[in-house]
Amino acid sequence: MNWEVAKNWLLAAFLLLDLFLGWQVYESRREMLGYVASASDRLANTKTILSEHGFILDTNVPSEHPNMAFVRAEFGSVPLADLGQAAFPQSNSLQVDKQAGVVRGTQGEIRTLGQGQWQVHYATPVPISDQGLSNLPGVWQAGQYQPDAGHTPASAAGKTGGSANGVRVFVQTAAGFPVFDAQVQVDVAAGRATGFTQTWLTGISPVGDAKPTISAMDALDSLASAVDKSTSGTDNKILSVTLGYVHKVPKSPAGAQEMPAPNYWFPVWRVVTIHHTYYINAFTGEVAAES
């Protein structure tokens, strides 16, 4: 065997292999650059579609749209006495009226509003932290809630209230996503909390297999097709786009006996404008407005 010839053949083979691998790296990088460009083009196209229907996109658009499953939960029920002790720990005696759903003490009052929902009023406003709800007396399972980044602090009239006045919104989470209709709405005056309204869910668990969700840009395209603001010229600025869950109550056929609604929460893209909130089904793109 001619070892010199064999060595040359091996060197040539390694050179060809290096060239082949280098070409693959080059192609993969070019495809990545092409993908970035196409995503940018897609965003520009979405902005154009929104503009044609009278919308102005004034926020970042999320790029990720992970697989999600339906979620099942129950509206939580907490004994009135426990709520009272948590909200007013320094009250010597609490008056609990179970029939009226009211707790009264020297530090304030609690009033139940419905299944899994109650309202707390402090006789003396208490400090509130910008970090969360942990120091706010009476918030049940405060660690399950996070600030709702999609909503700016608002006054009762729906206008921006600033950091010292208005309503701060926190949302409960499920599988790491916000549950938009399970909230703690904190009333703030002069930088202190005067009370809050809480909706609490318990037993949150996924149902079935996770499925692919549509992208935020697909959701915005659906919104533009379903809601035309081009003639009104008002309430057309999109302030936030967020992926999460919302409760959907199925409607009974006309004349049919009302049946208890299954407690399911559905993946949605929430789109917030100045005065309205829209929910776009994250599987189908169906658009619904908050009532």
Image (spheres, rainbow, N blue to C red):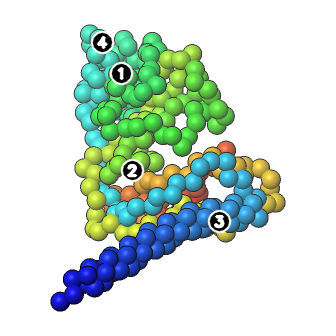
Q: Residue most toward the left? A: 1
Q: Secondary structure at mark 3?
A: helix
Mark sitting on residue 177: 2
The residue closer to the viewer here, 37 or 148, is 37
Label 2 and label 1: CA atoms lie apart by 23 Å
Label 3 near label 2: C-beta < 8 Å? no
The quadrant where residue 212 appears: bottom left
Q: CA distance from mark 3 to mark 4?
A: 61 Å
- Give the mark, 2 or 4, whose residue is nearer the N terminus: 4
Of callouts 2 and 3, the N-terminal one: 3
The residue under label 3 is: 41
Q: Earlier in the sequence, mark 2 or mark 1?
A: 1
Indicate which disc, 3 or 4, sits on the residue closer to the N terminus: 3
Give how far apart the Cα atoms at labels 2 and 3 are.
28 Å
Task: Tell me: residue 12, above or below residue 50.
Answer: below
Residue contact at pointers 2 and 4, CB within 8 angstroms: no
Residue 192 makes an appearance in the image: yes
Label 2 sits on a secondary structure element that is strand
Look at label 1 and name its amino acid.
Answer: Asn
Q: Would you name the residue on which mark 1 appears?
A: 135
Left or right side of 6 for 127: right
Q: Secondary structure at mark 4?
A: loop
Residue 232 percent across, percent down from the top left: 80, 56
What percent of the width, then of the height, locates residue 9?
30, 83
Q: Nearer the viewer, mark 2 or mark 1?
A: 2
